[in-house]
Amino acid sequence: MTSTTAPTTTTFRRLVTAGDGTLSTETAALPEPGPGEVRIRVRAAGITPADLGVRDGFFHQIGLATGSVGLGWDLAGTVDALGPDVDAFAVGDEVLGVHDSFDAAVRGQGEAVVLPLRAVALAPEGVPLDAAATLSLNALTAKQSLDLLALEPGQTLLVTGARGSVGGFAVELARLRGLEVVAVGRGDALPTGVDGALDAAAVGADVLVAVRDGGAFVAVKDPAEPPAERGIRVTTVHTYAQPGELAELSRLAQEGRLTLHVAERFGLDEADAAYARVAEGGLRGRVLLVP
């Protein structure tokens, strides 16, 4: 039996797209959590470049959608319902989460969302709850990219887009691992001979020249993965929440070891303006939708 507080409504609003470049809000039945799931009343949800792709038809082009679909990958809010036999959280807990699957119509940019336990963690204490929405996808991507690089303490890592959301977390996490970090922003010259490169800015093949023979390179999206050369191990990170990962990242944010940046906040009814701001680029931090 699902445990929940008495709902004030049985419906919620969410942001959707038909994949035609437009956005709209719709009212839908409030989703119920199943086994191993919690429902979250969303305080804030981030907008990512991936959301721009979904708005412009990516899900529809690859056959994952035929009608309206939700948007949004990372979020923060308050647990208001528990699935059967869920005791890892309590109703009222402030949490952060990530919607890392491609197969759900109800996503993070709305008033409520249901997520599996592996994709939810308690929000860091002492941090505004909406700011916690900037952590999940970005920090997971950075952490899992570093895992793929598999560099040893003392080795040198080059991070492109180091002033951006993923790149900023990558720099902080890499230093915690004892790596020597070369942080590169737009227009900066590239060094050569580094042991590995995390291409958070999706520069692509031009960054590969900086990596020594036999080094490692990780792209954050498939089109930016260059062909391997000189024995360099080349791969792309595909972010997927594993049990315990978000909790560890939340702990680091609570300790002040990860820095959270909110660029701008928009209401759900201002989604067009919010998406336009993300498309402009040049942001320091995440644009948030606040339902």
Image (spheres, helix red, strand yellow):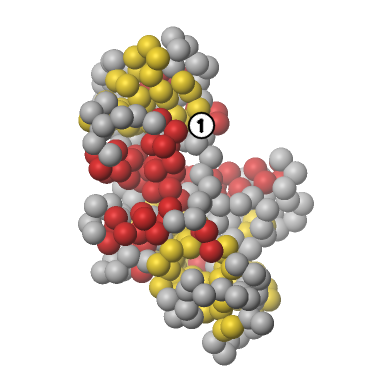
Q: Which residue is mark 1?
A: 236
Q: Is residue 169 rendered to the left or right of residue 64?
A: left
Q: Secondary structure at mark 1?
A: strand
Q: Quadrant of the N terminus?
A: bottom right
Q: For residue 210, what is the image quadrant?
A: top left
Q: Quick check: can you spot residue 147?
A: yes
Count of residue discs: 1
Q: Residue at x 48, y 63 (%)?
A: 120
Return the x and y of residue 46 as percentages of the image width and height. Answer: 45, 57
Q: Which class describes the residues within 10 Å of circle 1: few (<14), some (14-19), or many (20+)? A: some
Q: Quick check: can you spot residue 24?
A: no
Q: Is residue 206 rendered to the left or right of residue 125?
A: right
- Work out whether 170 lies above or below 113: above
What amino acid is labelled 1 in the image?
A: Thr
Q: Residue at x 26, y 18 (%)?
A: 191
Q: Residue at x 31, y 29 (%)?
A: 152
Q: For residue 154, what is the image quadrant?
A: top left
Return the x and y of residue 218 as percentages of the image width and height. Answer: 44, 29
Return the x and y of residue 9 as percentages of the image width and height. Answer: 60, 85
Return the x and y of residue 240 as percentages of the image width and height. Answer: 53, 47
- Work out whether 251 lies above or below 278: below
